[in-house]
Amino acid sequence: MILDFGSQYTQLIARRIRELNVYCEIHPFNHFPQPDDSVRGVILSGSPWSVRDTRAPFPDLTGIKGRIPMLGVCYGAQYLTHKYGGEVLPSNTREYGRAKLVKVDTGDPLFKGITPGTQVWMSHGDTIVKIPQDYLITGSTEDVNVAAFRISVEQTWGIQFHPEVYHTTEGTRMLGNFVRGICGCRGDWTPESFVDMTVRSLREQIGNDRVVLGLSGGVDSSVAALLLDRAIGDRLTSIFVDNGLLRKDEYESVLDAYRRMGLNVRGVDASAAFVDGLRGVDDPETKRKIIGRIFIEVFDLEAHNVQNVKWLAQGTIYPDVIESVSVNGPSATIKSHHNVGGLPDKMHLKVVEPLRLLFKDEVRRVGRALGMPDEILSRHPFPGPGLAIRIVGEVTPAKLETLRDADEIFISGLRRSGWYDKVWQAAVILLPVQSVGVMGDERTYENAVVLRAVTSTDGMTADWSHLPHEFLAEVSNQIINRVKGVNRVVYDISSKPPSTIEWE
């Protein structure tokens, strides 16, 4: 169990542990269940707070500390020091970035097999200057004397660096020493075991009832459909709605793929309703809400043609669950998400969420274990509002046609060049900007489009993909020559944060 103090790295701790095939859960420090016998260990996360701040998160560890193995990371280590008689003060030296663990007690079980001098990643403004009685220093850097400690009379450890980040080169081994060696977790939580467990659970939860699921063509809903299909077969009815905002020929190709997968799927062409509903609208949030409302209307109408439905399936994944009970409450809305929000209440259905325990990368691994074809499994994430939020401003049939043609050139080029599987997400954005150009001997005044490609693990942070200049030049040339109305192509080199992946 990971207690979250608001660190940007908390989910990364969980993902690293999951990569060790050990199941873990994240809970807010101020709202977590008392551990039962199934909890083998507890990790205290980092935090943006200082332990000396009056508003700093102070958890009640009664019944945990000293009874269950515990590891404090960064703020967690400082809390274990400050709370129990040590001293934490603002640092006089730089403690951000790479450092070397010049002294390390390799006899300590947390550091078994760790190389002295190994690189670690520091990120804190305070430092531990005095440890409580019964605490032993087990690691130091050149600048930080107490980089790691353990409590001699109990199975509690603290480290002032972040083992979960890539720059701590032996961090995964340290976490493995903790969760497998110290906590005794078996490491048998694999995609295959998740499938078996979830199928059994779905059969027990749903019984002989019928379920409807809204398919989007994306990985999450597709994997959820395969899990439910394995559990209840044709008692699952999947509905795939063409909102008129999909990529070129996507509706037909994805619907065909679903049918070849053996899913009981119904295709609904509602493109006219969506495009008409967006006429004259240029505000991004308004566009999203219109698309969400029409989707609910279309899905509800189609679902009522399925007899005796009791359940609505959703592709909710673990980051959505964590966010809903975050330390600081739900975060500020950056943008509305077009999902099936509002459907359970409107349709009076119970909700089943087969993927609510999984991170995005784990969903793909489960899909692979289920035998999902690569044409669906390897698809880039695609926003629910589709091309509507890749057209900055009003959405019109003519703009959709232009964007589809440009997007098809970019995406097919990525596939041919081998770059498609190296980037997390790619898109073309049509700008409400016209620029002067020259084609032949004529002056043109036509649209500009933006190419966007990013690398990421889960979409929460992303860096722009360093596509080869030769590739970008080729794609730009093809778009300008083949897509009517476009005479300028630019490449987006913004990262998230501060930018978002999508433009709207």
Image (spheres, rainbow, N blue to C red):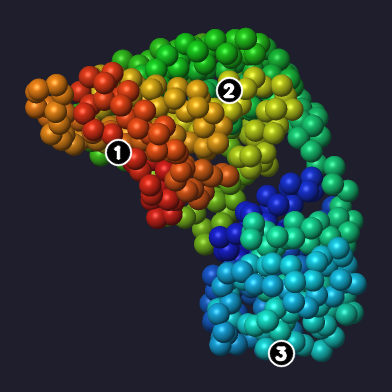
Relative depth, front residue between 136 and 300: 136
The label on residue 376 is 2
Q: Quadrant of the N terminus?
A: bottom right
In percent of width and height, residue 399 lies at 25, 24
* Residue at (65, 35) in percent of width and height: 363
Relative to 281, is 462 above or below? Answer: below
Relative to 287, is 182 above or below? Answer: below
* Residue at (18, 36) in percent of width and height: 433
Residue labelled with disc 3:
130
Regarding mark 3 in the picture, which secondary structure is present there?
strand
Residue labelled with disc 1:
490
Q: Residues within 10 Å of mark 2 (few under 14, many from 20)?
A: some
In terms of image quadrants, where is residue 450? top left
* Residue at (42, 43) in percent of width and height: 501
Relative to 412, is 163 above or below? Answer: below
Which label sits in the foreground, 2 or 1?
Answer: 1
Q: Could you give the CA–CA distance between mark 2 and mark 1, rounded to whole angstroms?
A: 29 Å
- Please indicate, yes or no, whether residue 81 appears anywhere in the rendered image: no
Which label sits in the foreground, 3 or 1?
Answer: 1
* Residue at (21, 29) in percent of width and height: 487
Relative to 300, is 473 above or below? Answer: below
